[in-house]
Amino acid sequence: MNKFDRVFWNKVWSLTRLYWSSAERGIGVKLLAWLSLLSVGSIALGAYASYLNRDSTNALVGKHLAQFYHYMLIWVAVTAIALPVTVFLPYLGRRLYIEWREWLTYYFTDAGFAHHAFYRMGTVGKVDNPDQRISDDIGSFVGSTLTFTVTVGFALGGVATYFAILWSISPSLALILIGYAVLGTYFSVVIGRRLVGLNYYQERYQADFRFGLVHVRDNAEPIFIYGGERHENDQLRGRFSKVVENFNKLILWQRNLGFFTESYGSVVALVPYWFLAGTYVAGRLQFGQVVQAATAFMALHAALSIIVTGFPSIAEYANQVTRLSEFLDEAEAARLSEIDGREMIEIVESPRVGLEHLTVLTPGGGKRLISDLTADASALGPLLIKGPSGTGKTSLMRAMAGLWREGSGTVTRPALADVMFLPQRPYMILGSLRDQLTYPRAAGVSDEQLLDVLRVVNLSDLCDRFGGLGAEMHWADVLSPGEQQRLAFARLLLNRPSYAFLDEATSSLDVANEQLMYELMNKQRIPFLSSGHRPTLLKFHRNVLELSANNWRVEPSAEFETYPSAS
């Protein structure tokens, strides 16, 4: 993390080429070409301005007024030409920035969703705060890369141009400046390399603190119900103390680097005048040449000193590169985990639902949850999975969804596009009430149907409470757990899947509403499999799959025959 070695530059290249080798790079290439053209024009105008400055200074010192005014008119023309160059350079740079950032953001979000990479990041824990890496680090990386590219481009053009000007006036002064810049670059890297690691951890600790604040915001009600204010406050203080501790180290090393960079930049401004004063007094140089030499000297110094003056930014850039590379490495690990040859749970798509010699392990293979389970859920259905907490009911559901592949055996089920999983805590999307009901595949349903389904699940009051189907709220906060579960069943009825998997999906409902939800599924003839431990579930299921520590058994549900809808 503290080295600018081949590994680091390979990471920079890997991130950069994603966009520039893609098929959508056309607009970026055009913008970059215009940026390059304008940059060359800016350097050429700057070089010409140094000669114009020399000649106008000499004319003024020599009291040649007509000649001086002639040069002033040329200055006006140069300024007029430079104006559009000066305005369009940052404009085109920002256009390229947002074009590149948009593409890269979509690339990262696609990589996060592919192969369940976001889910893996949350369970494995190697990549902290993936949301911040996408929302903040990508923008910073693109902006910094463009800045450094333009800066380096200007620097290279400036070095060639102003070195030639300075060499024509004083070769010795040009060589002295080269040596001065090389030494300054070396010492700035030695002093400032510690900033790379400190910037990395500063971003991480700040993201952890922000996550803690969001966690408190999202769970304010249970925190106050439990009286857990002090605990949560201590947690936030602990997270922020790491921010403060690391920040103090960061500013200490920034101070050390500042002593060097400020002295490095301040002293050098005096060098050309000190070095050329004797030559001017001896009459071997005109005063305009001294001024031109000083201008060229400072411009060349600025071009050669980009590492010295920009090292704090370079340290932050290294942090951005590391964090984005870690994200893509974990996304790639998620992809490879599906093709690395290890024995994994096989998913077979079929109209039927069944499990054959299924063994389920925790992510990473650390613990065996279920061993050699075989059950034909379609033949045994409706099937209820029950057992003590920790025996793997939810894990079995995750395995059937394809989220957990650690283990062996086969899961047979319809394609994910044809089924629906209802977890204990329903997923409330960002959007309107209409969006909630039609998620994920019921777009095009009429408002009359939406109102009707709200009525049948006993949620007809939602439109009046929140202002209609178009109302947008933070639904996870404004709806009770029972209302969220009934909304999930409304969503199920509208999507009409070929099979439903219910994981404690009625745990927050009263007995009457629980029975209503199962009757609605039976009325629409949606086959289902449930997991839970409430005894009221027994009458809705023909058979029961009982899980215990590494054991299982299937037995008929004695209460099923007494359920009126069983027939």
Image: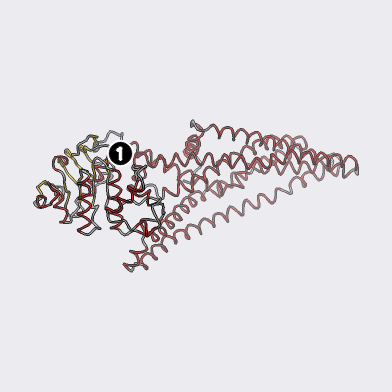
Location of residue 411 by image quarter? top left
**Camera-side residue: 77 or 301?**
77
Against 43, residue 433 (above or below) is: below
**Camera-side residue: 479 or 41?**
479
> In the drawing, does residue 518 fall left or right of residue 52?
left
Residue 301's spot in the image, x, y percent? 68, 43
Dot 1 amino acid type: Ala
Q: Is residue 147 visible?
A: no
| Label 1: how many Cα within 10 Å (few below 14, some 14–19, many 20+) | few
Residue 235's spot in the image, x, y percent? 38, 62
> In the drawing, does residue 188 fall left or right of residue 298?
left
**Camera-side residue: 202 or 516?**
516
Residue found at the far front of this picture: 448
Q: Which residue is mark 1?
A: 417
> Label 1's element?
helix
> In the drawing, does residue 477 fall left or right of residue 102?
left
Against 163, residue 249 (above or below) is: below
Residue 283's spot in the image, x, y percent? 87, 41
**Camera-side residue: 563 or 32?**
563
> In the drawing, does residue 294 fall left or right of residue 536?
right
> Residue placed at 33% from the left, 69% from the top?
227
